[in-house]
Amino acid sequence: MYIMFKSAWEILMPNTKHELQKKDIEELLNKLPGMLYRCKYDSDWTMEFVSDGCLSLIGYEKIDVLYNKNVTYASLMHNDDRDRVYEIVTKALENKEAFNCEYRIFTKNSEMKWVWEQGLGIHNDNGELENIEGFITDISAQKLQSDKLEKELRKKDKEILINLSLLNEYKRAVDESAIVTKTNKSGIITYVNDEFCRISGFSKEEVLGRSHNIVRDPTNPKELFEDLWSTILDKRVWKGVIRNRTKSNKTYYVKSIIVPILDYEGEIKEFMAIRHDVTDLILQEKKIKFQTTDHLTQLPNRQKLLEDLEEKRELKLAIINIEKFKEINEYYGFDVGDRLLVELSTMILKLLASYQTRLYKLPGDEFAILADNVIDKEGFRKLIKHILRSIINNEFEIESYKFTIRVFSGASLQKNYFINAEMATNHAKQTNEEFLYFDENLDIKEDLVNNVNWTHKLKEALDDDRLVVFAQPIVNNKSSDIKKYECLVRMIDTDGTIISPAQFLTIAKKARLYPALTMVVIQKAIEHFKDKDAQFSINLTLEDILNTEVINFLTKKINQYDGLGHRLIIEIVEDEGIENYNEVSNFIENMKFLGCKIAIDDFGTGYSNFDYLMRLNVDFIKIDGSIIKNINHDKNAKVVTELIVSFAQRLNIETIGEYVYSEEILDIVKKMGIDYSQGFYLGKPEQI
């Protein structure tokens, strides 16, 4: 373009041979969108020639600008740009090069414009600079668009930077809080974060290049992974819980989200897995299920029944009791008894299959059936009677044994379902009736009134702190020393009368107050013996052992005082829970860990069985008082006692004789090799 301008200047200079072209060229130049100029190289940029475009560009007539008559071109330049432009032009002139630059000017009416200028220094034959020639055009519109575009680009860049920053923060947050891995399409690990290494115990070097089988637990079902791969290969997100194993073979559970990462063509590039450790939640769920499930029959247990009874209003509850189940255990052994309970549960479930009911396994020899108002009263009666007759008419065959059993049932349609149904069942057994409703029997209601009165009395005693602990000494038969005490609960009536536990313990269990009684005994016994040297024992039933609140309270109190656990003996009431071997065994091991010793109370009656003594880690056997009190005149009692003592000695279990009421009994007990004695002759229970 500059060559064209230079040719034009030569034509416009006075020269007769070009006179014919001057007008045409001048007209052409004046039509250019800008201003053609010739100026001096000075601080004012003194204009010697400007084209007609001068007016539209700067708002001044040519005469105003030429030779700085009314305005200098330099004065129109923006102050911030003037020096910069001068430096650009000067440098170009020194190098005898063309220049171009962008800068701002102010027009006659103070409008700011952006202009683009291109020019070249004109030198004479001696190489001396004579002037500058060039072209200036308005680029404000382009500059505005360019600035707008630049602002948008900067905004986009900023958004991208913000998004990248957020993405990095999200990645950091996920890396910090989750287990993150990536694999290629074949499932080979290409990335693991630090959390994966921390949870699994494997280093990055050990897992990169391998599949997730390195941490998978082999017990995961095959169908789980078939579903996983089918889902993600279909470009869908898979969610689920997977059981894994650490490097040290410890089980942990992860809640997993596996996402297929697609390329720009929509094809799978890799897989990303985000997992969270849910081991504690899974174990808690298992613990809850463990607490509400009978582990022999896998049926919901008594605790679950009580929870379900609280959730619904109009219900029907029947309890089925097996007559003389203790004798089956004693004669055939617990394995046979357990298998009978399992077969019976299966049989009842089949009979209930077409009814909207739920079957529960209660402690010992009882089942419960719960129904809502879908079944009416007579329909429920017919259903329970049908089940009872089916059981009675069935011959059970277990191992080489064949036998029939008899069952009774009581039911209730009123609130306090469990207590009412239990009372109805007990009344059915007492009256030898196969089935009866609590609501139809006045005798049961009289018992209920009595129970309600005792429940009220018991609640008041709890509120008024009138449940107290008595301690009875246990004497060493060799040294006659008293270094052990059994803690026993008593109720003090409002008139000061001491009430035996025989009058209120059964009611306490039915009224769900028994755990509160146990915790009172634990609290007061430990507070009394915490700073004494003597050993002391506390009685626990199966209900206590299965009650998380009671056991947590006991554990907390044991841990509260140094060395207390080594002086505490837990007496497990023998006729209430030895059947539940797993629960009792786990409880014993936990108490042993705290230093406690374990005694089996009232051994020799009820569910007594030598088999479980070989499996349970107990320290003492307390021989039941009903046997000890008769050993001076009952040969059978003496034989049973000798058998128990001999068996215990072989297992290095110490024995305690209960109900030693005379010197004669004490002498016999000592001669038989019983280690300790307890009874009124040696010391009555005294309040602590």
Image: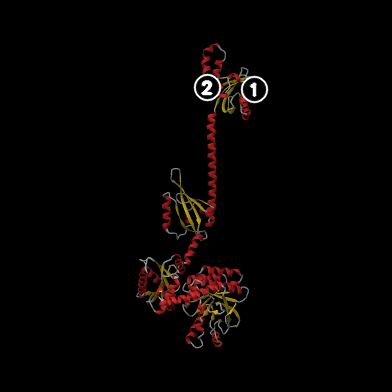
The amino acid marked with disc number 2 is: Leu
Q: Position of residue 97 (x, y in %)?
A: 59, 24
Relative placement, left or right, of 345 versus 539 is left
Disc assigned to residue 42: 1
CA–CA distance in space, label 2 to label 1 = 26 Å
- Residue 276 or 466: which is nearer the viewer? 466
Quadrant in the rendering for residue 682: bottom right
Q: In the rendered view of the protein, which quadrant contains the C terminus?
A: bottom right
**Residue topped by disc 2:** 32
User: Compared to 269, does 619 lie above or below?
Assistant: below
Q: Is residue 656 above or below residue 250?
A: below
- What percent of the width, then of the height, locates residue 105? 59, 27
- Residue farthest along the right direction in this orientation: 43
Q: Position of residue 480 (x, y in %)?
A: 60, 83
The reply to whether residue 70 is in sight is yes
Per the image, label 1 sits on a secondary structure element best described as loop
Query: In the displayed structure, would residue 194 be above or below residue 109?
Result: below
Mark 2 vs mark 1: which is more N-terminal?
Answer: 2
Most foreground residue, 150 or 97: 150
Residue at image point 61% right, 71% down: 563
Viewed as shown, does residue 333 lie left or right of 83?
A: left
In this view of the protein, which residue sits in the foreground, 616 or 530? 530
Q: Tell which of 60 and 289 is nearer to you.
A: 60
Q: Nearer the viewer, mark 2 or mark 1?
A: 2
Rate crowding at label 2 as few (under 14), some (14 to 19) or many (20 or more) other CA atoms within 10 Å.
some
